């Protein structure tokens, strides 16, 4: 794209973003960006502002509905779980911190917490919704035990003065799709 085209695109994007402008946009130093980078930034802002808020299940056509977990034996449930994880990834939804959960627990979490969650459906190829499958505040011990780095564990210990749980490998290590 030529410089003139980039500047024309920039002017159009600035006009389109104007109704959504607030002080948060001014926290980004647009003067330090190239015109191309600024255009990408403005495009992502517009995508965010215009994105509908929908239950994640409704991001799929047809709506993604999971059969109750008790209808499955372990092996078929595991196969279905990995199919669902793949479908979520197709919509740029990444699951993080899942290895402390059994397949059945993760399947239930997806059905109970993730699919009904109201989220902005931002349709940009390089934008991911990251769903942490552990509440670091509510389940601090599991996070410290299975996921926290040595630096994070040290910081927690220094801050709280409490004894750290021993580090362990998570009991249900699984390979999940990740962004590149």
Image: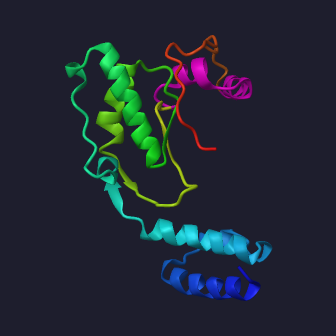
Observer-nearest residue: 180 or 150? Answer: 180
Q: Give the position of the N terminus as an image quadrant.
A: bottom right
Decide if residue 23 is on the left or right side of residue 89. right
Looking at the image, what colour scheme do you see?
rainbow
Observer-nearest residue: 159 or 96? Answer: 96
Query: Which residue is found at the position 49% from the left and 27% from the top?
Result: 98
Decide if residue 112 is on the left or right side of residue 119. left
Residue 61, image x, y percentages: 29, 52
Residue 59, image x, y percentages: 34, 53
Observer-nearest residue: 87 or 106? Answer: 87
Q: Locate residue 12: give its quadrant.
A: bottom right
Q: Locate residue 107: give its quadrant.
A: top left
Decide if residue 174 is on the left or right side of residue 147. left
Q: Is residue 25 above or below residue 128?
A: below
- Dominant secondary structure of the residues highlighted in magenta in the image: helix
Q: Which residue lies furthest to the right in this view?
A: 32
Query: Which residue is found at the position 30% from the left and 35% from the top?
Result: 111
Query: Which residue is found at the position 32% from the left and 42% from the top?
Result: 115
**Count of numbered badges drawn on the protein:** 0
Q: Is residue 119 above or below residue 13?
A: above
- Residue 148 painted magenta: yes
- Residue 18 painted magenta: no
Q: Give the position of the C terminus as an image quadrant.
A: top right
Residue 82, image x, y percentages: 41, 29
Q: Locate residue 72: give its quadrant.
A: top left
Q: Residue furthest front?
A: 1
The span shown in magenta is 136-159
């Amino acid at each position: 794209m030529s410089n003139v085209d980039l500047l024309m695109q920039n002017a159009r994007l600035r006009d389109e973003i104007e109704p959504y402008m607030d002080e948060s946009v001014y926290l980004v130093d647009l003067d330090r960006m190239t015109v191309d980078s600024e255009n990408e930034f403005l495009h992502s802002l517009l995508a965010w502002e215009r994105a509908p808020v929908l239950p994640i299940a409704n991001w799929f056509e047809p709506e993604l509905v999971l059969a109750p977990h008790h209808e499955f034996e372990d092996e078929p449930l595991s196969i279905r779980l990995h199919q669902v994880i793949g479908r979520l990834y197709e919509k740029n939804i990444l699951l993080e911190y899942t290895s402390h959960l059994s397949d059945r627990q993760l399947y239930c979490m997806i059905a109970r917490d993730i699919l009904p969650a109201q989220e902005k459906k931002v349709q940009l190829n390089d934008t991911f919704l990251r769903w942490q499958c552990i509440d670091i505040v509510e389940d601090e011990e599991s996070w410290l035990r299975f996921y926290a780095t040595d630096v994070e564990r040290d910081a927690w210990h220094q801050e709280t003065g409490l004894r750290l749980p021993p580090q362990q490998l998570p009991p249900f290590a699984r390979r999940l799709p990740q962004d590149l």
